[in-house]
Image: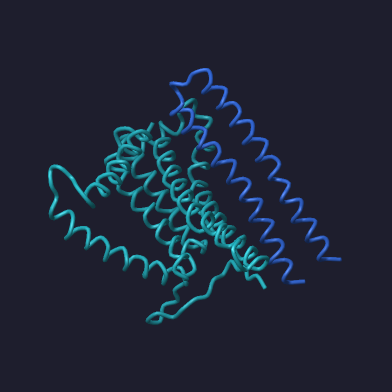
Amino acid sequence: MTLGIIAIGAGIAALCGAGAALGMGNATGKAVEAIARQPEAAGKINSSLMFGLIMMETCAVYALLVGILIVFILGAKV
Amino acid sequence: MLEVSLYPEHYEVFGVNVGLSVVISWYVLAILLVIILLIHFLVVRRMQIVPKGWQNAIEFMVDGMYRWSAGKVGHAADFVAPVAMTLMAYVFFNTIIELFGLPPATEDINCTFALGLCTFFLVNVTGLKFRGGIRGRLQGLSMPSPIVLPIRILTDLIAPCSIAIRLFANIMVGGIIMQLIYAVAPIILPALVASYFNVLHVGIQTFVLGLLTLVYVSEAIE
């Protein structure tokens, strides 16, 4: 029973990935549009895109870390 | 079964309690020192106007780092680039050591938090140096209007934690995924996946740490 609730908690933590994926898709799409409009600014757009993607990826990695800690540290105590 | 722990094992060295990551980073630093001495005596002492061989590679790395930082932080590049390069070399070699069978030092959150503190000091020292003392730094922090000052200070204080947890989580998660793959398919598949999680991933994380350091510095001095 408790293990099941822990698993549900880990699953809820993993939902953060949906938000990160939406943000990444949005940002990449906008960057592609911008590069298509102004190909000479590709370098600057790419570097700011990279920074934004790192931030979003961090969010997803936090969720992954929380999920893993829930499963392995809380789950080991049951 | 999979072992995940936030508290790695500790050793007694001359009566002082040191973590596993510290011992591993000593190994790595010893290897790096030997490499640096070799480079110094074999390459730097015999520099030529027209580079060839190893001098080409080293000039490419150093020059690339200086140009990359100049693109981000402008006139502060001469001050920032060596520190950023040192941090990146530390992270890269301490993580790639996994290929030689040792656990990576960056898998310990204490190690990555120390790296985050290094970045924090670099950001603040550069900010104080290039904005003219504490007054200029505070002016820079309250840039659009003074209302944002507490929020900007909070952002600056959270930056080392963010860097630490990002690096730690990325490396740890890579290790856990590799362990899971070894448990599921012990042959062939790990060889393919390890080339990403043990080699390419390390390069990406090193790049990310350098990029974040430079971006934080550029925010502090602009």
Q: Where's the N terminus of chain B, which quadrant?
A: bottom right
In the image, what residue occupies the spot 64% across and 34% down? A25
**Compared with residue B165, is residue A74 higher up or lower down, i.e. above or below?**
below
Where's residue B53, x and y in %?
Answer: 22, 51
Which residue is farthest front?
Answer: B188
Q: Residue furthest top?
A: A37
Residue drawn at the location 43% of the way across and 53% of the way down:
B117
Image quadrant where one finds the C terminus of chain B: top left
Answer with left or right where residue B116 lies relative to residue B4. Answer: left
Way the structure is coloured: by chain
Image check: B73 left or right of B52?
right
Residue B65 position (above or below residue A13): above
| Colour given to chain A in the rendered image | blue
Across the whole image, how many numbered discs are drawn on residues?
A: 0
**In-front residue for pair B81/B100:** B100
Residue B140 in the image, given as x and y percentages of width and height:
41, 32
> Which residue shows up at 59% across the image and 44% down it?
A57
Where is residue A77? Give x, y as percent.
73, 72
Indicate whether B135 appears above or below A66. above
Question: Furthest residue to the right?
Answer: A1
Q: Position of residue A54 (x, y in %)?
A: 54, 42
> Residue A75 sits in which quadrant?
bottom right
- Which chain gets the cyan colouring? B
Asked whether B148 or B215 is in front, the reply is: B215
Q: Give the camera-side residue of B159 and B34.
A: B34
